[in-house]
Amino acid sequence: MGASKEIRFDGRVAIVTGAGGGLGRVYALEFARRGAKVVINDFGGARDGAGLGAAGPADKVVDEIKALGGEAVANYDNVATPNGGENIVKTAVDAFGKVDILVNNAGILRDKGILKMEPENWQAVLDVHLNGAFHVTRPAFSVMRDHGYGRIIMTTSAAGLYGNFGQSNYSSAKLGLVGFMNTLKLEGIKYNIKVNTIAPIAASRLTEDILPPDLLAKMNPAYVAPIVLYLGSEECNETGRIYNCGAGFYNRAAMMTSPGAVVGAGKKIPSVEDVSANWAKIMDLKGAKEYGQLNDLVLQDLLSALEGKKEPAQSGGGFAAVKDVFEKMPGAFQPGSAGGAAVVFQYCISGDGGGDWSADIKNGACTVASGLHATPTCTLKIQAGDFLDLMNGKVNAMKAYTSGKLKIEGDIMKSQLLEKIFKF
Ligand code: NAI
């Protein structure tokens, strides 16, 4: 593969919290090297958050950036207070006029087994990681909304996603950040604010006694910076996703939901024994899917159970009737892939079992209605049998189009979105 265009941040303003050391310092240096103006926030406390704070760590990174010819200002506020969060954002606005990128990175550890976990150690960790992200994100979101642009990166942890002995406080705070992202991804759509979450693994003072020494030596934080920079860039169209990253390995983690079972056929309240009898089916993740938001679960699968349908939506094909496709369409919609698009698709399906349906996509939601829409962006015309073949994966869309089975009118380019934004 040839070298792709350099990803730059000229004219962009980034805030990195906890940037006085560890991972945050590396992100900040890289943002600055690529043209961003950076706010280096660091409270300068101990690994467990203790101490009165110190200016040294943030100042040192600002000096490093200036020595490279970059632009940066220091901020020593504590993310754990609402005032601290406000001041961090104010520092960016006063110095550079706006905030385009926010990396919520500041963190501490207070590991203990649950029985030894005193409330203050629980609280301190939630205050820095979860409440801290809220304190900085809220004022930053307001500035981003005013400018119609924002990239926010949360920092979770494999401890939160999967569990880690002795870290109940930290795991809870870290998975809380995923919940925070899940809602912000929806609230940010119309302002072009994209929110993603990383779960890094790297050598730092936080992991020096957690990871084995030979592994630590290979876990340079520099391996994490490229994905943070990508998620902070204009290039990034993703929102609402989680990524593990470390040592040059990057993958996506997701909350998958099994097809499940409708117990009682929507006609009676199931007994405990009914649930027990259906256990294997409830548990089976085969055909699992990713919901885009709460309503995808409620409007799609729960309602179809109440209507007495035997099976909730399965992922991928298997459609026997054209109308089934449109019933499942809202649940198959992937707001994260729609990238804030506003478009109305009109389907005109001819022949037996056909009809007209429209799918109206805006503000990160998909509304399907039967009949003709007054102002469709793009109209798709196809025979019922051909449409089912298409939806059941027997024919691909390009082939159906080039063979004339599928006719597309209006904004043809928009039809290319279809494969991306619906995952049946
Ligand atoms: P680190 O301890 O080297 O860096 C964290 C920085 O945050 C420190 O410079 C600290 O002074 C600052 N900080 C702490 N509390 C603060 C507060 N209240 N306000 C402002 N600044 C504060 O740790 P590291 O490893 O670089 O961690 C960065 C983030 O990555 C943390 O959120 C951590 O939980 C997360 N993480 C790190 C992993 C790793 O393998 N290093 C694994 C999973 C998550």
Image: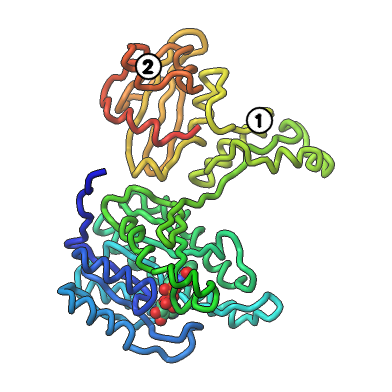
Estimate the x, y position of residue 74 in percent, counting from the top left.
27, 80
Tag 1: residue type? Glu
Q: Is residue 356 above or below residue 183?
A: above
Specify whether tag 2 is near ligand 1 (CB below 8 Å): no
User: Which residue corresponds to the image point at 26% horizontal and 23% vertical from the top-left?
Assistant: 410
Ligand 1 in which quarter = bottom left
Q: Quadrant of the N terminus?
A: top left
Q: Is residue 130 visible?
A: no
Which of 311 and 81 lies nearest the eye of the viewer? 311
Q: Is residue 200 left or right of residue 409?
A: right
User: Which residue corresponds to the image point at 38% horizontal and 31% vertical from the top-left?
Assistant: 418
Estimate the x, y position of residue 247 in percent, counting from the top left.
42, 62
Tag 2: residue type? Ala
Instruction: Rate crowding at label 2 as few (under 14), some (14 to 19) or many (20 or more) other CA atoms within 10 Å.
Output: some
Q: Work out which residue is located at the far right of the displayed protein and give it.
A: 273
User: Which residue corresponds to the image point at 52% horizontal and 21% vertical from the top-left?
Assistant: 323
Estimate the x, y position of residue 266 in percent, counting from the top left.
71, 32
Question: What mark, if any, has residue 400 been given in the picture?
Answer: 2
Specify whether tag 1 is near ligand 1 (CB below 8 Å): no
Quarter holding residue 16: bottom left
Task: Compare marks 2 and 1 and give the one earlier in the sequence.
Answer: 1
Q: Is residue 2 visible?
A: yes
Question: What mark, if any, has residue 260 been given in the picture?
Answer: none
Q: Residue under circle 1?
A: 311
Q: Marks 2 and 1, Cα distance to the nearest angstrom?
A: 29 Å
Estimate the x, y position of residue 226 in percent, counting from the top left.
33, 60
Q: How many numbered tags mark residues here?
A: 2
